[in-house]
Amino acid sequence: MMLVVQFTHFLGMSLWIGGALVAIMLAIKAEGESVEVKASVARMLAQVHTLVIAAGALLTVATGVVWIMMLVQGGQSEASATPGVWIMEAAGLVAGVLVLLVAVPAAVKLGGLAVPMDDGKMLPAFDYYHKRLVRVSSVALALAVLSLFTGVVL
């Protein structure tokens, strides 16, 4: 059972961090493009966030909680009491909450607002949600990588 939980945890992390990196690359590449291309990329980003990043974050957080509970129940609570594990748990949990409760809803809203207007610009709210998504996703990705680093190195 422990191996299944660990595998699922690492699979979730791969989806989450990999999806976030792909989303960043897509967003950067779309910067110099036409409004129509930017709108199309924003709709794709909404899909990446809901189907890949959110699924990865949910799997990672859920299996992380299960993994810690299994360690405690198995009498290995000292393994979960090291500073590296505490940082990993806290950073991962905060990152997961940011992704699931802020970034994904912002991405979905951004995808819905991705409609070019007649004057060749996007709707005014598009910029607000775009900036919000960039900020929150950047912080969540940094925390996810910190969590991964501390879990492996410390």
Image (tube, rainbow, N blue to C red):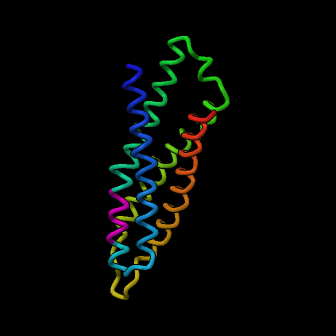
Residue 81, placed above or below residue 109: above
Q: Is residue 46 magenta?
A: yes
- The image shows residue 69 at horizontal and vertical percentages of 50, 21
Quadrant containing the C terminus is top right
Residue 61, placed above or below residue 100: above
Q: 117 or 70, which is in the foreground?
A: 70
The residue located at (59%, 23%) in the rendering is 80
Q: 80 or 97, which is in the foreground?
A: 80
Q: Is residue 147 magenta?
A: no
Disc tally is: 0
Q: Tell me which corner region of the image, top left, top right, bottom left or bottom right, holds residue 40.
A: bottom left
Outermost residue to the bottom = 119
Outermost residue to the right = 83
The residue located at (63%, 36%) in the rendering is 87
Residue 21, placed above or below residue 82: below
The residue located at (57%, 34%) in the rendering is 151
Residue 27, placed above or below residue 72: below
- The image shows residue 63 at horizontal and vertical percentages of 43, 30
Horizontal placement of 40 versus 10: left or right?
A: left
The residue located at (54%, 38%) in the rendering is 93
Q: Tell me which corner region of the image, top left, top right, bottom left or bottom right, holds residue 22.
A: bottom left
Outermost residue to the top = 75
Main SS type for the magenta part?
helix
- The image shows residue 119 at horizontal and vertical percentages of 37, 88
Horizontal placement of 25 versus 47: left or right?
A: right
- The image shows residue 33 at horizontal and vertical percentages of 39, 79
| Stretch of the chain drawn in magenta | 40-47
Quadrant containing the N terminus is top left
